[in-house]
Amino acid sequence: MTDFTLAQEDASIGQSEAWTRPAEKKYASLSREHSLALLHKLATDDGFRSRFEQKPAAALAELGVPHETIVNLKAGCLTAKPLADKAAMTAAHGELSNQASSVCLSMWVPTVKLNSLDK
């Protein structure tokens, strides 16, 4: 019996989904500790801010974020982009550090949004 035949047999009893449905991607998130460390560095360290804007993955590794976590973050989290100012990072750090719960966090870094004059 070939794999193709097995697939056909499975489909005939209603089990074709296991053969045809692609697996859903599960994205990683930063721990609370890494999130706080990231926000603190982005609020206080100009050199780190510059490195993070240029190469977010390398900057996260510098913070001690495990490689496995970094490679499983959403691609948008690892693209180079301008950051919000230090005050926004300080505010985000304060909000996170004052939260009573340690809910799992998605990686979200405040960024600058510029209005486009093109219409």
Image: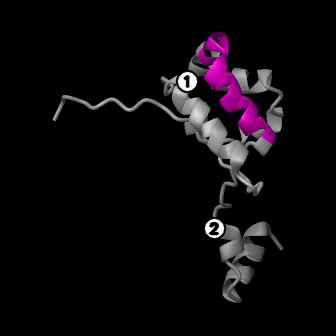
Identify the residue position indicated by label 1 in the image: 86
Identify the residue position indicated by label 2 in the image: 21
Range of residues picked out in magenta: 33-49
Q: Residue at left 77%, top 54%?
A: 102
What is the quadrant of the N terminus in the image?
A: bottom right
The mark found on residue 60 in the picture is none
Q: Residue at left 77%, top 36%?
A: 34
The kind of residue tagged 1 is Lys
Residue in front for this viewpoint, 72 or 90: 90
8 lies left or right of 91: right
Q: Quadrant of residue 10?
A: bottom right
- Determine whether the residue tagged by mark 1 lies in a helix, strand or loop: helix
* Residue 32 appears in the rendering: yes
Whether residue 42 is in magenta: the answer is yes
Relative vertical location of residue 89 with respect to residue 11 in this rendering, above or below: above
Q: Earlier in the sequence, mark 2 or mark 1?
A: 2
Q: Quadrant of residue 113?
A: top left
The kind of residue tagged 2 is Arg
Q: Residue at left 64%, top 68%?
A: 20
- Determine whether the residue tagged by mark 2 lies in a helix, strand or loop: loop
